[in-house]
Amino acid sequence: MASNLSDISRTLVAPGEGLLSVTTGSDDKKTISSYFSKGACASKSSWSAEIKKVLKQDWVLLACPSDAGGGICRGAAHGPLGIRRALYKENPQFAKHDLGDIPCIPQLLHDSMNSKAQLDQSYEALFQKKRSKGESVSPLNLLSDVLTELYKNKKQVFLLGGDHSVSWAPFEAFQKAKLKQNIGVLHLDAHTDLMEDRFGVEHCFATWAAHSVRKISDPANWFQVGIRVSRKKRQEWEKKFRLQQYWMKDVQRKTPEQMADVIAQQWMRSKVDSFYVSLDIDALDPKWAPSTGTAEEGGLDLNYVKTLLHELCARFPLLGGDLVEVAPRIGSKEDAKITLHSAVECLKVLLP
Ligand SMILES: [Mn+2]
């Protein structure tokens, strides 16, 4: 094991504890901690001991409960609490893969957005020591650091967001870890997320894909599936970014098996080594995922997504993935239940 891998335990906190709140979500935090050995989640040092055990696994779960990069209706910071609670209820065996959370100061997103004085101050509050030059503080930077170490050590990582801005970090980390792989990407979403900036802000839910698509060897291996709300036409996006889009009207002409064939043929032609899945829960129709910040009518059916994921996982190695924009506090209790059920069903197809 590379020496730096143990460094991640200085950053990570126990599952659920990355959402820095005292009472909100405390029931979920308590329920989740019951899936870990007694006292494991009690303190940072006891969680560090647990991390050592989790790192013996080939694949890990990691959460970044940040919705500072959301822009319309927030609440995705509560996604990891809800998803874990629903996932572990039926599948407690997955808890042994859980590395915990990135501690997320709710007003910070990326270190480039704040003054040095603010970063120094927040670092000291978070880690109880002085910040050395350039040390990460904001959720996206901490996440990128942790993912870089995990990828260097060949871990398969499944990330729970958070709003979609968190998906910038895996691609940044692929580069920092110097992964030599030719990566394919399946990006399921109602939106393109291809803005260069939004109101002059580089990092947010609407821009991560624009920055990330340039980091893979061939953008033609990036497939956006489920798009139905966009200010520009499909052709304009495809020309500018050289990726491939399948809007809902294109998807509806194909069975999920046929959609998988289209993607697989491109990836085989291009000799893709492995693929990454970024799943925005709003790719699903609101009847399957009402609890999300920017739900859009006319989306994908749960079974369509499950079959598509299943077909591709059967044909290509999965490098990892993320599940974002699950916001269980949006809508009714029934809405949250439906959304979490869909989220867990998709995760179960992806998890080894
Ligand atoms: Mn979206």
Image (cartoon, rainbow, N blue to C red):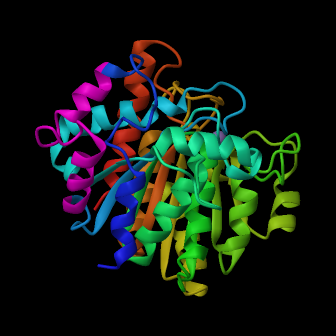
Give the residue at x 67% y 39%: 69
The spot of residue 6 in percent (x, y) is: 33, 66
Whether residue 79 is in magenta: the answer is no
- Give the quarter of the figure containing the C terminus: bottom left
In the rendered image of this protein, does residue 138 appear above or below residue 58? above
Does residue 214 appear left or right of residue 66 in this picture?
Answer: right
Does residue 6 appear left or right of residue 335 in this picture?
Answer: left
Does residue 128 appear left or right of residue 292 in this picture?
Answer: left
The spot of residue 292 in percent (x, y) is: 56, 29
Q: Which quadrant of the figure has residue 241?
A: bottom right
Q: Quadrant of ligand 1?
A: top right
The spot of residue 207 in percent (x, y) is: 75, 50
Q: Main secondary structure of the magenta part?
A: helix
Between residue 256 and residue 290, name the one nearer to us. 290
Give the residue at x 38% y 64%: 7
Between residue 323 and residue 35, name the one nearer to us. 35
Does residue 156 appear left or right of residue 260 in this picture?
Answer: left
Report how many numbered discs are placed on residues in the image: 0
Give the residue at x 88% y 48%: 232
Tell which residue pokes out farthest to the left in this image.
Answer: 38
Whether residue 35 is in magenta: the answer is yes
Tell which residue pokes out farthest to the front in this image.
Answer: 130
Q: Which residues are magenta?
A: 27-53
Would residue 254 be visible to someone looking at this image?
A: no
In the rendered image of this protein, does residue 329 appear above or below residue 159? above
Would residue 16 be visible to someone looking at this image?
A: yes
Q: Which quadrant of the figure has residue 173?
A: bottom right
In the rendered image of this protein, does residue 47 appear above or below residue 178? above
- Give the quarter of the figure containing the N terminus: bottom left
The spot of residue 273 in percent (x, y) is: 49, 82
